[in-house]
Image (tube, rainbow, N blue to C red):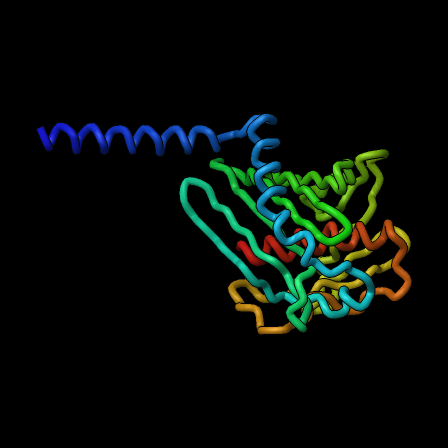
Amino acid sequence: MLFFLITMLVGVLGLLFLLRVFANFKPGERKLQADLQKMRTEIGQYGGELAPIDKQELDLFAVDQVNRVLKKRATLTAKGVFTTIYHEPVAAYSYKRYVSSKLNALLYVRTAEREYVYRFKDKDVQIIVNQRPLGTIKENGVLYSAADGKMMARINREGVQGLLPVVTPSRELGSIVATSPGAKPVLSTRAFEFVKDNFNEEEETLFLSIALMELVKRSID
């Protein structure tokens, strides 16, 4: 009788695991929206603690994180809060990678002023800022506008050694500090260098849209 009950329990647990895996395989729009709402709620607890990002905060933005959690199960999930070099929280994120042979993931990032949603599908990344489509980053690293399909910005991965410049068609906005594969971040290391003093709002949105995604990807990989 005990053996029968144990066998039944193992079977039920196995079924529940398979159902969880199936639910995270090629998620539909309803599943994505449900997960996004969970992320908003989860990250919402940090909303009042995040310092507004201005030029000073960009100069002090660090690779440091607090409250970082990384879990690898049927899916990969991660969350954390980026800080300045003085440990002031400036951006919180939640990430979920779904079951797939190709990259299939959802990322939510919250700053004091904006929310960024990233939908990773294979080699494309769709970006939504404050619930409005911004554009799509293609395999070539270029962010194309959702409005007219034109180039908005890109990462120059062949730039100065140790830096990843973010450029628009008109000028360079600043650089993300690069790290070698597998290298562990040094405490209080700045995340950005040579950020322009005269950002307008659109340029700040573009720079952060790319830079925040790059920092989270690096943290997870």
Q: Is residue 30 left or right of residue 53?
A: left
Quadrant occupied by the N terminus: top left
Q: How many badges with numbers are in the image?
A: 0
| Residue name at image x 83 percent, y 60 percent | 173
**Residue at image point 80% right, 63% down:** 174
Q: State the residue in front, 167 or 84.
A: 84
Observer-nearest residue: 14 or 182? 14
> Which quadrant of the figure has residue 149?
top right
Residue 199 is left or right of residue 1, and the answer is right
Spot the residue most to the left.
Answer: 1
- Left or right position of 13 against 61: left
Q: Position of residue 80 (x, y in %)?
A: 57, 56
The x and y percentages for residue 182 are 51, 64
> In the rendered image of this protein, does residue 62 appear above or below residue 100?
below
The foreground one among 93 and 136 is: 93
x, y (%) of residue 83?
A: 65, 64
Tell me: residue 38, above or below residue 61. Answer: above
| Residue depicted at 73% across the width and 39% down the height | 128
Residue 172, how many percent across, how many down? 84, 60
Snapshot quadrant of residue 118: top right
The residue sitting at 58% across, 73% down in the picture is: 186
